[in-house]
Image (spheres, rainbow, N blue to C red):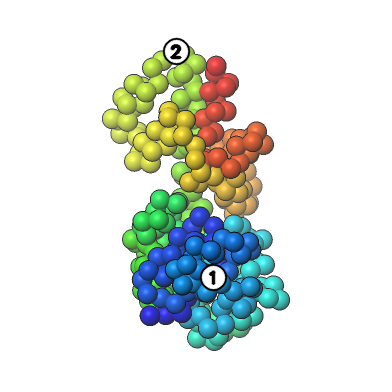
Amino acid sequence: MSNVSVLGLGAMGSRMASHLLKAGHSVTVWNRTPEAAAVLEALRAIQASTPKEAVICADFVIAMLRDDKASRTVWLSSDGALAGMKKNAIAIESSTLTPGWTRELGGAMSERGIAFLEAPVAGSRPQAEAAKLIYFVGGVESVLEQAEPILKVLGESIHYIGPVGSGALVKLATNALMGVQVTAIAELIGLLRGAGVDVARAIQVISGTAAWSPAASNVSGSMLAGQFEPQFPVELIEKDFGYVVEAAGSSAAVPTIAAAHGVFQRAKENGLGDKNMTSVVLEFIEKHS
């Protein structure tokens, strides 16, 4: 068994730490708000007061953080993780970040002689709970081979993408594809409802055609039921769309993605930021009511 540190105990990180503990690993955790560690401490996790303190004995360090800014602070500040890691440890950044930042972080790791993988995941709270995350890994394949036993505790499939930065971009592309589908289905539900069509029946018919995707069933089901408990909140997918536009260089380079980004921006501005991404349907129901 290994010594593993988990930095960030939000909806994803807390579940990852729990699986590692149940698999028999020694787990040290850190979170900006210490109260988040209470349940994990009951499972014998050790809570550290700083990222630097959390990683001193770690063989593997996993970060699951909100954005580039949080990642930079947790890894590179004076009490950040990089300052405390031992030379033979492996740093694994699983947050959804920009390719530019992950490459910069990889460079900082290299300067300190620390092996680094970017390993963002596809999947939200249910997949994290079931240890069925899908990993998109960027870095050196031999380092992935060393980290694979840890990642297999948390995910059902691990895909090597290429150099650092490529994993982040594939993750952003995946989220963009999901988000574009969400906005399209939301628009169509608003249109159908406004025209007086039986929306549930229409969706059932459409779902039997080649145009339908597996994800669309969950998305439309949430929208029709009005169930918007956060699995993937509006504010986070809006952030990811912004990262995609940044990676592309301009909105003009990705016009469909930029339009979907605008939908989530408006939803966030209208108070839906902490609701599930499917709550954007409310924007279109109101327009067509």
Q: Residue at x 31, y 24 (%)?
A: 205
Q: How far from the left and from the top, in percent, is residue 80? A: 65, 74
Q: Which mark is residue 196?
A: 2
Q: Which mark is residue 29?
A: 1
- The answer to which quarter of the image holds residue 263 is top right
Query: Residue most toward the left?
Result: 208
Q: Secondary structure at mark 2?
A: loop
Q: CA distance from mark 1 to mark 2?
A: 53 Å
Residue 10 seen in render:
yes
Q: Secondary structure at mark 1?
A: strand
Q: Are the two marked residues, 1 and 2, in contact with CB atoms closer than 8 angstroms?
A: no
Q: Nearer the viewer, residue 212 or 50?
A: 50
Query: Residue most toward the top?
Result: 196
Q: Residue at x 47, y 67 (%)?
A: 42
On screen, 92 above or below 254?
below
Quadrant for the N terminus, please.
bottom left
- The answer to which quarter of the image holds residue 104 is bottom right
Q: Residues within 10 Å of mark 1 (few under 14, many from 20)?
A: many
On screen, 233 above or below 91?
above
Q: What kind of residue is marked 2?
A: Gly
Q: What kind of residue is marked 1?
A: Val
Q: Residue at x 61, y 81 (%)?
A: 84
On screen, 228 above or below 194?
below
Q: How far from the left and from the top, in percent, is residue 45? A: 49, 72
Q: Nearer the viewer, residue 32 or 41?
A: 41
Q: Residues within 10 Å of mark 2 (few under 14, many from 20)?
A: few
Q: How far from the left and from the top, in percent, is residue 281? A: 51, 30
